Image (cartoon, rainbow, N blue to C red):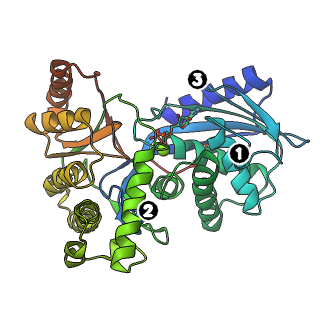
Amino acid sequence: MSSAEEQAELAVAELRSAWGVQPDGVWAAPGRVNLIGEHVDYNGGRCLPLALTRVTAAAARRRDDDRVRLASTDPSAAPFEGTLADLGPGAVSGWAAYAAGTLWAVQQAGVDVPGMDLAVSSDVPLGAGLSSSASLEAAVAIAAAELAGRDDDEALRHLLIRAAIRAENEVVGAGTGGMDQTVALLAEEGSALLIHTRDLRTEPVHLGLAEAGLELMVIDTRVSHTLADGQYAERRADCDEAARQLGLEWLSDAGPADVERLADPRLRARARHVVSENQRVDTVVELVRAGRVAEIGPLLDASHASLRNDYEVSAVELDVVVAAAREAGALGARMVGGGFGGSAIALIRPGDAEAVGDAVLAACRQRGLAEPVTLTVTSGPAARRIC
Ligand code: ADP
Ligand code: MG
């Protein structure tokens, strides 16, 4: 059974046990991993994520009144009950803010969202840097839109992306730049998605990993982070200040020479990361499009170094697994996501998977760190109706 089918069954079972109803439909939306282009999405830059085959499934049933009841199979997520009028900023907290906040934002965008009973189930690890949050938002958003009778087309998907971003920014209170929601709703199976984050324009980029005899491994350090914490906001503030000092709307418009004009060494380092990371995205896209995906390893390595040294968002766990993966034969490796824990990726040859898995485990054990979990990922489709 596929991950989506499995999660769909679990979501339906949860809908039955939590709210005692059968679904009108089940929708699923993927987590993601970002191949390259980290911490550029709020700087108007470019990134290249791919959707995972792991998903959050949402089973939902339309109600005739204005009540909204939400449940999750996640044991730490308490059920939520409210009304359509009461789902916005300040009204909801905890996990329900992601789901209720999405319903609020979809309503705000002019969709006639009905009252509903909804339950979710996910195999995207929570807080691991694989964007369980956007997969939850996207699954709830598309479920709500279809329960409202909207046709699923490109215009709707763009509306839902904006709504999911609003939910996370305004209701959850987490600073997210839009990469996660965009890939969850627009990804194409087998491809990564080049996102121009300032206008959310996208282009699929066929990866051809299997053809090149390669695999992408995710290494979850199992050290959790929350994007809602102060570090993310501090980095955003640094970037805004650097852009302001350079007289730019977007820091991604700076060139290497502009960076050197910044007097403050911290702002200079932050800007250096953003500018060099955008260049690395462009180079990776060129290589992948030329069928040379096997050559992107050094760019992944350079991205990690930049995130660690200039952007200062790595963590000892991430540095240890990245170094161990490389030593065990990975062609390149880097931390992904917001940082301070979460996951890393490694580009590997399938024959090296076991050696790389063993090496990262041994390295963490030796240092007394949490034991990481590794998984091989392939590029899956965007949010969709399952049944
Ligand atoms: P990431 O998106 O990298 O997984 P975040 O901190 O952005 O990490 O989002 C994780 C949060 O999203 C969880 O702490 C929880 O509040 C919420 N969440 C995600 N998926 C689920 C789920 N299936 N059930 C309940 N809450 C979820
Ligand atoms: Mg998230």
Label 1 close to label 3 by CB (< 8 Å): no
Q: Which one is in front, 228 or 162?
A: 228
Q: Position of residue 199 (x, y in %)?
A: 49, 72
Residue type at mark 2: give it.
Answer: Tyr
Q: In screen coordinates, is 334 left or right of 375? A: left
Q: Which one is in front, 387 or 232?
A: 232
Residue at 14 percent across and 41 percent down: it is 330
**73 to 387, vertically: above or below:** above
Q: Which residue is mark 1?
A: 90
Q: Position of residue 292 (x, y in %)?
A: 17, 61
Q: Which residue is mark 3?
A: 76
Quadrant where the image shows the C terminus: top right
Label 2 close to label 1 by CB (< 8 Å): no
Assign a secondary structure to mark 1: loop
Q: In screen coordinates, is 192 left or right of 289? A: right
Q: Which one is in front, 254 or 380?
A: 254
Residue type at mark 3: give it.
Answer: Ser
Q: Which residue is mark 2?
A: 42
Marks 2 and 1: which is nearer the front? 1
Q: In screen coordinates, is 295 left or right of 30? A: left
Q: Position of residue 112 (x, y in %)?
A: 81, 57
The residue lying furthest to the right in this view is 65
Camera sees residue 32: no
Compute the Cα span from label 2 to label 3.
30 Å
Under 8 Å from ligand 1: the CB of mark 3? yes
Q: Position of residue 302 (x, y in %)?
A: 17, 55
**171 to 264, vertically: above or below:** above
Q: Quadrant of residue 248?
A: bottom left
Among numbered discs 2 and 1, the one appearing first in the sequence: 2
